[in-house]
Amino acid sequence: MCLAVPGKILSIDASDPEMKMAKVDFDGMVTDICIQWLPEEVKVGDYILAHVGMALNRIDEEEARQTLEALRQMTPPEDLPDASTV
């Protein structure tokens, strides 16, 4: 089973024209995600769905919030990672 997780784009690095990357906030955990092959342009503040380091598509903020809330409800608080240690 695959799981795509919503995240908010914090910054975009287009210095390598063949591998556009973004810093993405996944509910407190920030990581680099490839946005090179998205079918549409994204900007800082947009939400994306990502799987294994790749952005799959852009989604609206409400859809991202609903998905994050559903993920929170499925995960007991003691099993959530501490964002300060990541």
Image: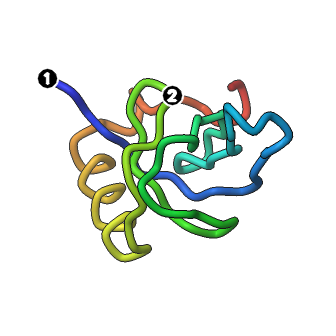
Return the x and y of residue 61 as percentages of the image width and height. Answer: 43, 74
Split into 4 quadrants, where in the image is the C terminus?
top right
Return the x and y of residue 74 as percentages of the image width and height. Answer: 21, 42
Seen at 86% across and 40% down, the residue is 15
Q: Which residue is mark 2?
A: 53
Residue placed most toward the observer, 61 or 21: 21
Q: Amino acid at mark 2?
A: Gly
For disc 2, the neighbor class at 10 Å (few under 14, some 14 to 19, many from 20) is: few
Asked which secondary structure carries label 2, the reply is: loop
Please state if 14 lies on the left or on the right of 53 as rendered.
right
For disc 1, the neighbor class at 10 Å (few under 14, some 14 to 19, many from 20) is: few
The image shows residue 67, relative to residue 56, as above or below, that is: below
Q: Amino acid at mark 1?
A: Met
Q: Which residue is mark 1?
A: 1
Q: Mark 1 and mark 2: span between their CA atoms?
A: 16 Å
* Residue 52 picture quarter: top left
Please state if 12 lies on the left or on the right of 24 as rendered.
right
Q: How many numbered marks, from 0 up?
A: 2
Return the x and y of residue 22 as percentages of the image width and height. Answer: 68, 45
* Residue 4 picture quarter: top left
